[in-house]
Image: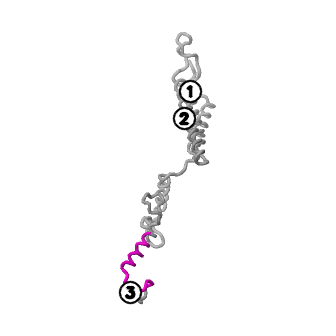
Amino acid sequence: MIDTTPSLALLVLVAVLVGTGVTLVLERSLSRVAIGACLLTYGVNVMILMAGGRAGGPPIIGQTEVEDMSDPLPQAMVLTSIVIGLALTAFMLAMSYRTWQLNGNDEVQDDREDRRIALAANHDRINARTTDDIGETTAERADDFYDETSAAGNHEMPARVKAKEKEKERRENADPLEDPKGGAR
C-alpha cells in the first residue's frame, strides 16, 4: 500500500507558489500578472500531484500490483493544466508586449469604472461625517463637486454652471435703465 501523507516541504512549496502568484496577479503591470499566473498554475499543479499520493508503480495491469500503482488521473490533469498554462502565458506575454509597444509601459490604466468606484468610495467616506461648518450635510453639497467621469459632455463644475445661470437670469430680468453695476443712470 502506498503512503498518501503529503510532504511538509511540498506543502510549503505550494503555499509559497500560490501566495506569490496571487500577489503578482494583483499588480498593475501585465508582465507581473503573467509571471503571477505561471506561479499560481505551478502551485496548483504541485497540489494536484500531492493529492494523488506518493509515486508508485506504473498503472499498467499485470506489471504492478494494484495496491502499488500510482493514480494516473492527477498526472493527466496536471499535463492538461501545463498545456493550458503555456497557452495562457503566451497570450499574456503577447498582450504585455503589445501594450508596451503602444504605451511605452505595460501597466493597466484606470478606466472610467475604476474612477467611478473610487469616487463613490470617497463619497461614502465623506458622508460618514454628517454635517460641516455651515450646517449642510455633505450629501446636499455633493452636487457641487465635479465628476470627471460623467458622459454629459459638460466639463464645468456644477457650482460654476449655477452661478452662470443666475447671472444670465439676472441680466434678462434687469431693468434696461439701470446701471449694470447696480446703480441708477
Q: Is residue 140 magenta?
A: no
Secondary element under disc 3, as helix, strand or loop, is: loop
**Is 26 on the left or on the right of 168, as rendered?**
right
Secondary element under disc 2, as helix, strand or loop, is: helix
**Magenta range:** 161-181
Q: Nearer the viewer, mark 2 or mark 1?
A: 2
Q: Is residue 164 magenta?
A: yes
* Rendered position, 21 above or below 151: above
* Rendered position, 145 above or below 106: below
Along the polypeptide, which appears first: circle 3 or circle 1?
A: 1
Identify which residue, 80 or 147, lies in the foreground: 147
Residue for point 54% across, 50% down: 109
For disc 3, the marked residue is 177
Q: Position of residue 150 (x, y in %)?
A: 44, 58
Q: Tell me the kind of residue under disc 1.
A: Leu
For disc 1, the marked residue is 49
Q: Residue furthest bottom?
A: 185
